Image (spheres, grey):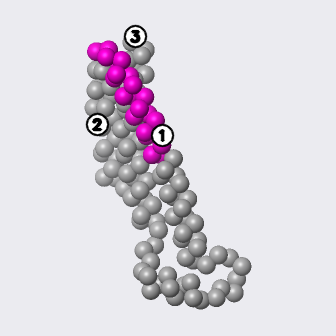
Amino acid sequence: MALSVLVVLLLAVLYEGIKVGKAKLLQQTLESLPALSSQQVMLETDQDSASSDLPPVRRTCRRWYLCHFGQSLVHVIQVVIGYFVMLAVMSYNTWIFLGVVLGSAVGYYLAYPFLGMV
């Protein structure tokens, strides 16, 4: 029983950590991608590129799609862990419930100071 409570506690801590990691990933993605105005996009797409490399707009779009794919994977992992924690709570075991509550509190306490460090 103690091992079950410990596992659920660690899952709740991991869930809170993933929430913070997802927010940091989004913030870093938005900072790394250049903000192109619609006029810049029109000018860059109208210009013919002499090199075989992709134009800057396509590279930016490709990078955005890769970042979006990574964020989507992190979101799926967060949802799966959230459902596992929910199923553990739905066992109606008081010790498991207290493990989830304590794990969420510890995860929040440990993870949220890292949000301001970006």
| Residue drawn 37% across the image and 51% down it | 23
Q: Which residue is mark 1?
A: 77
Dot 2 and dot 1 residues touching (CB under 8 Å): no
Q: Which residues are magenta?
A: 74-96
> Which corner quadrant of the image does residue 11 belong to?
top left
Q: Amino acid at mark 2?
A: Tyr
Give amino acid for label 3.
Met
* Left/right of residue 63 with respect to residue 33 in the rendered view: right
Tag 3 or tag 2, which sits nearer the N-term?
A: 3
The C terminus appears in which quarter of the rendering? bottom left
| Residue at the disc numbered 3 | 1
Q: Is residue 110 above or below residue 114?
A: above
User: Which SS does the magenta portion mostly show?
Assistant: helix
Whether residue 68 is situated above or below residue 86 in the rendered picture: below
Is label 3 in a helix, a strand or a loop? Answer: loop
The numbered mark at residue 109 is: 2
Mark pair 2, 1: CA separation: 21 Å
Q: Nearer the viewer, mark 2 or mark 3?
A: 3
Q: CA distance from mark 2 to mark 3?
A: 25 Å
Q: Tell me how far mark 3 sits from mark 1, CA to CA.
A: 26 Å
Can you tell which of label 2 and label 1 is closer to the viewer? 1
Which image quarter: residue 20? top left
* Label whose residue precedes the other's in the sequence (2 or 1): 1
Residue 6 position, x and y percent, is 40, 20
Residue 53 on the magenta span: no
Residue 46 on image: x %, y %: 57, 88
Q: Is residue 13 visible?
A: yes
**Picture coordinates of residue 77 (x, y %)?**
48, 40
Q: Nearer the viewer, mark 3 or mark 1?
A: 1
Marks 3 and 1, the one that precedes in the sequence: 3
Give neighbour class at mark 3: few <14, some 14-19, many 20+ (Cα, 10 Å). Answer: few
